[in-house]
DNA sequence: GCCAAACATGACACTTGATTCATGTCTCGA
DNA sequence: TCGAGACATGAATCAAGTGTCATGTTTGGC
């Protein structure tokens, strides 16, 4: 059921307006269904019913449930990337970019909880896309951090590897705060949270005069 | 299938040595199976086969696959807590405790990748245990951070809320580094990674003289 | 040694939902 | 306006694995 046909290249995109509409509707209710009830509980029949099409229609556009999920992960990647680029482009320095980016990320999670959950669950459905998703973000991060380092905005990490570690730390912070305050506590004011996080990113938490190597 | 019987209190523990042995064997191969193939792909029949017992035996000890998973999450919580307590008890200050804890965590993930993955996936099978798992860790963290703050080892976060934010940041860092270097790149030397991370926790990454608010 | 409780067996009845397909209907360029 | 490709239908097929249960076997206290 997993690796036979579903591994192949995606099905051709629709060629008419009607088709595009239908595909979008399916994708949309798949996002909602999978996001809310989880991949296992979400059924094709529920998805198509909510989209207002017949079951078979699903298979005109997607090979399987895994296939829609993959598509949704890609979609989230594009949307989030766009959202973040926009949010951070006015930043004066890297630290401010981190603040703005984190803020924008938390906003995004609150606005798109279903999509966000789909991406997280994709890890257990198609690890490859999931890895790709984060690996690409890590790459952007590395580039941004290296540039900031060159500009003297952040302390030199040292090795090339250090940049990678920092990138993953930053992503981990975002994801966990996204989970805690984006999904689980969606009413908490974001500004204080982002302030604390940014201060920690900028200066750490060691009291002045502590050893801390 | 989900919320009928499986929500109830756990089945009574075995009363004989034989029973204990059997239960343990099932738990063990469940860990392996679910960890490696994922919850959906893991079948009771595979689990029992690998444990060397009949299918029906499974239901003497567990109500369902969800039920074993819950048990495994609890188990991981206990093991990890113990491992971390042991690893950090010699620390001179909070920053050193963070270093030792992170190092121990990454070790743990490398040694128990299956169990670790089960916990992560539990989020999509029984969100309640998953939340409980992290909420409890967050609580320990809050206590440790508050104490360190009082001892003057770390900068005061300010509000009570700040401690919570820091705790989730620290967990996010650990989890993401665990994923990246524990699971995905299990050969990379840990010390340099932990060094970079600790430095970042201690002092942040803002270059001296940068605005950073 | 005996027996009641505990444990183990494994075939199978059942549920569930994914995917197929034969049969229409619609779209849009020429 | 026509027709070929595109799109849509939904009932039928099919696979897969869960959880049950009637029937043994083992354990350990007495």
Image (spheres, coloured by chain):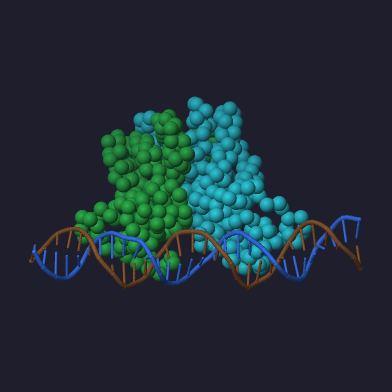
Chain colours: A green, B cyan, C brown, D blue
Residue nearer the viewer, A151 or A87: A87
Residue B99 seen by the camera = no
Percent position (x, y) of residue B178?
A: 51, 51
Q: What residue is at 43 percent from the left and 56 percent from the top? A: A43
Q: How many numbered circles does the render carry?
A: 0
Q: What residue is at 34 percent from the left and 62 percent from the top? A: A56
Q: What residue is at 28 percent from the left and 40 percent from the top? A: A86
Q: What residue is at 73 percent from the left and 59 percent from the top? A: B19
Residue nearer the viewer, A118 or A56: A56
Left or right position of D16 against A137: right
Percent position (x, y) of residue B53?
A: 67, 67
Percent position (x, y) of residue A17?
A: 21, 55
Task: Please state, as top left, top right, bottom left or bottom right, where the C terminus of chain B lies in the image.
Answer: top left
Task: Please state, as top left, top right, bottom left or bottom right, where the N terminus of chain B lies in the image.
Answer: bottom right
In this view, C18 is above or below B101 = below
Left or right position of C29 against A34: left
Question: Which quadrant would residue A110 be assigned to in this image?
Answer: top left
In this view, A194 is above or below C15 = above
Percent position (x, y) of residue B185?
A: 48, 57
Question: Which quadrant would residue A106 be assigned to in this image?
Answer: top left
Residue A57 seen by the camera = yes
Left or right position of B140 against A106: right
Residue nearer the viewer, B176 or B196: B176
């Amino acid at each position: 059921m997993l690796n036979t046909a579903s591994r192949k290249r995606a099905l051709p995109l629709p060629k008419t307006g009607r088709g595009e509409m239908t595909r979008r509707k399916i994708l949309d209710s798949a996002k909602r269904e999978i996001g809310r009830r989880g991949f296992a509980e979400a059924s094709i029949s529920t998805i198509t019913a909510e989209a207002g099409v017949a079951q078979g229609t699903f298979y005109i556009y997607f090979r399987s449930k895994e296939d829609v999920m993959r598509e949704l992960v890609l979609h989230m990647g594009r949307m989030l990337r766009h959202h973040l680029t926009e949010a951070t482009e006015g930043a004066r320095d890297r630290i401010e970019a981190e603040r703005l980016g984190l803020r924008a990320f938390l906003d995004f999670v609150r606005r798109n909880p279903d999509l966000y959950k789909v991406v997280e669950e994709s890890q257990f459905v198609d690890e490859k896309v999931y890895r790709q998703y984060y690996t690409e973000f890590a790459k952007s991060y590395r580039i941004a951090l290296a540039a900031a380092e060159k500009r003297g905005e952040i302390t030199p990490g040292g090795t090339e590897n250090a940049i990678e570690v920092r990138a993953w730390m930053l992503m981990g912070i975002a994801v966990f705060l996204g989970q805690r305050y984006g999904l689980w506590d969606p009413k908490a004011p974001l500004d204080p949270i982002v302030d604390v996080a940014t201060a920690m990113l900028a200066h750490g938490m060691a009291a002045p005069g502590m050893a801390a190597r």
